[in-house]
Image (tube, grey):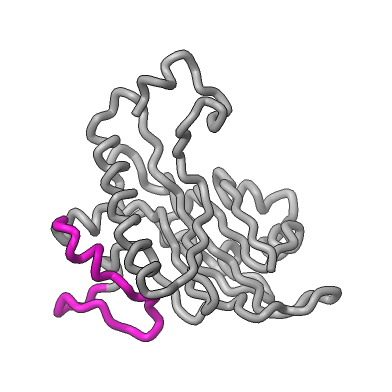
């Protein structure tokens, strides 16, 4: 099975050289394609940008306009549903369940429950983390995560928040984002699930991890 992760910095711009979404996905030649920074609002997810023959698509788009973040992030996972002409279709490519976001708040019913056989589940650690429902919802409003359960593994497609050194409020958001995501991972691991995490995490522990660390790298949290 071949999984590709790719920060496209605008999905429409990446499709143009290939004329169609299907052409773009075919060129990547993978069973599962995880894209970040699609820069699409929900009303822009039309057939030409979301559907391609032989693929199932799973999107998350930003739901907030704070600091101009409308159409700012967004992730999408495309899973090959049919075999190509020269390659058999591997088992486990199509997911058996999927979540938009990682907190479960986008799937809450009017009664407050998170239900549905099409959900990946295992939200207990997140819901018992001490954060309010509104705080959790804010973490998922920027369209930064899609989770797909493929049976033998659970795949997280993540576009992590980027923070400027002097933006304390945004830093707190980023730290909370990954703290709560870790709670979700721990719930899944305790249940015996195998995890694969891909994407643009916007984390550089050491200067070698950054294309342009700059002179103040060590002082940037």
Q: Which quadrant is home to the N terminus?
A: bottom right
Q: Is residue 198 above or below residue 90?
A: above
Taking the magenta stretch, the answer to whether it contains residue 59 is no
- 88 to the left or right of 73: right
Comparing 220 with 78, the one in front is 220
Residue drawn at x 57%, y 58% as measured from the top left? 34
Place residue 57 in its image quadrant: bottom right
Taking the magenta stretch, the answer to whether it contains residue 110 is yes
Percent coordinates x, y for residue 190 in the rendering: 35, 70
Q: Is residue 209 above or below residue 124?
A: above
Place residue 166 in its image quadrant: top left
Percent coordinates x, y for residue 105 in the rendering: 25, 66
Percent coordinates x, y for residue 24 in the rendering: 71, 58
Q: Which quadrant is home to the C terminus?
A: top left
Main secondary structure found in the magenta portion = loop
Comparing 149 with 118, the one in front is 149
Residue found at the far bottom of this picture: 117
- 75 to the left or right of 169: right
| Residue segment shown in magenta | 108-131
Residue drawn at x 62%, y 61% as measured from the top left? 33
Residue drawn at x 14%, y 79% as measured from the top left? 111
Percent coordinates x, y for residue 20 in the rendering: 70, 60
């Amino acid at each position: 099975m071949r999984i590709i992760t790719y920060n496209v910095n605008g999905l429409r711009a990446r499709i143009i050289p290939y004329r169609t979404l299907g052409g773009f996905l075919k060129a990547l030649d993978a069973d599962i394609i995880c894209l970040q920074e699609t820069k699409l609002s929900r009303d822009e997810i039309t057939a030409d940008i979301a559907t391609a023959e032989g693929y199932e698509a799973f999107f998350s788009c930003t739901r907030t306009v704070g600091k101009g973040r409308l159409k700012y992030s967004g992730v999408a996972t495309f899973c090959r549903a049919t075999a190509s002409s020269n390659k058999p279709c591997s088992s486990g490519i199509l997911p058996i369940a999927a979540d938009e976001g990682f907190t479960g708040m986008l799937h809450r019913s009017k009664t407050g429950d998170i239900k549905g056989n099409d959900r990946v589940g295992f939200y207990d650690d997140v819901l018992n983390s001490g954060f309010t429902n509104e705080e959790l919802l804010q973490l998922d409003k920027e369209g930064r995560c899609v989770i797909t359960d493929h049976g033998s593994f659970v795949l997280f497609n993540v576009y992590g928040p980027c923070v400027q050194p002097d933006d304390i409020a945004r830093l707190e958001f980023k730290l909370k984002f990954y703290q709560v995501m870790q709670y979700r991972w721990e719930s899944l691991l305790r249940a015996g699930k195998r995890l694969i995490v891909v994407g643009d995490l916007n984390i550089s522990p050491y200067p070698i991890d950054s294309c342009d660390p700059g002179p103040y790298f060590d002082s940037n949290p």
